[in-house]
Image (cartoon, rainbow, N blue to C red):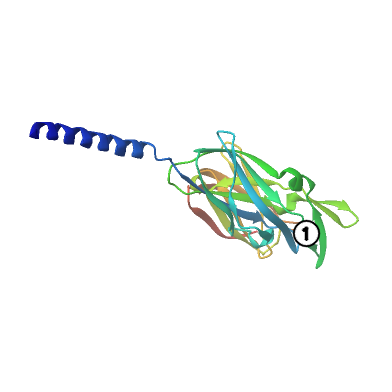
Amino acid sequence: MKKVNLILCTIMLGVAMMMNACKKDSKEASYPYAMRMTDAPGDYDAVYVDIIGVEVTGGDGKAVLLNVNPGIYNLLDFSNGKDTLIASSTLGVSTVSQIRLILGPNNSIVVDSVTYPLSTPSAEQSGLKLQVHQQLQDGVLYTVLLDFDANKSIVETGNNTYKLKPVIRTIEKAISGSISGNITPAVPYAAVTAVSASSETYTTVTNKDGYFVLGGLPAGTYAVTINPAAPLNDKTINSVVVTIGATTSLGSIQL
């Protein structure tokens, strides 16, 4: 009888171990995902966008709405290295193929202290779709920056009417670095261009104080050129090294 009980105990223990292993094996992977927004400076008093939703499409083709922080955001509040969290969630898939930014109707632009409506017909109907190819890691927070370019995104159609045709670059913070600096004299809205050894080009402009940050740069060596308005001359700084997760400061740049 003791031998039978021992056999039964052994079988039950084995079953329990198998069930526990099955539970562990059946645990679904989770992929924390955060969406932040930044902007290049623009020659406007303010550019307000009404964010009401953010959706991502996984490698399985299914769309997932993130937990959004809805509101009307002034893009110019988040330039030169500043950003803000607009949405987050935990995904059940390891790849993301598309990001869709959904805007509401309350978009506007302020020019010379006067506020004008900013029309965004395509965004209101189907959202701003950004094609991406992102591979996520289980349990690791993946942060993506939506980098607006205010100067290129605003189209004046005449008679003080403006249209938003967003120029947005997605930046994967985990695999990029940045370059910062300030020019003297402090010329606002001077173009700043970084060209990599493989001829990839990244641009921004200085703010009103002559400061700039070029973010979302892959690791490598760059030539940085500053193009101020006349009568100041262009200036190029060669061999600027960018490393992942760090900002390379060029300090004060005399034009």
Q: Is residue 236 in view from this perspective?
A: no
Q: Is residue 18 above or below residue 107?
A: above
- For image coordinates 73% across by 59% down, the residue present is 47
- Residue extending furthest left? 2
Q: Residue 122 at what x, y percent from top left?
A: 77, 44
Tell whether 94 sits left or right of 188: left
Q: Where, quadrant-wise, is the N terminus in this rendering?
A: top left
Under tag 1, what secondary structure? strand
Q: Where, quadrant-wise, is the C terminus in this rendering?
A: bottom right
- Residue extending furthest right? 159
- For image coordinates 57% across by 46% down, the residue present is 171
- For image coordinates 67% across by 64% down, the residue present is 186
Asked where in the image residue 118 lies, by quadrant, the reply is bottom right
Count of numbered tags: 1
| Residue ID for mark 1 | 108
**Which of these two is toward me, 156 or 254?**
156
Q: Is residue 72 in view from this perspective?
A: yes
Amino acid type for the residue under numbered disc 1: Ser
Q: Residue 139 at what x, y percent from top left?
A: 43, 46
Asked where in the image residue 86 lies, by quadrant, the reply is bottom right
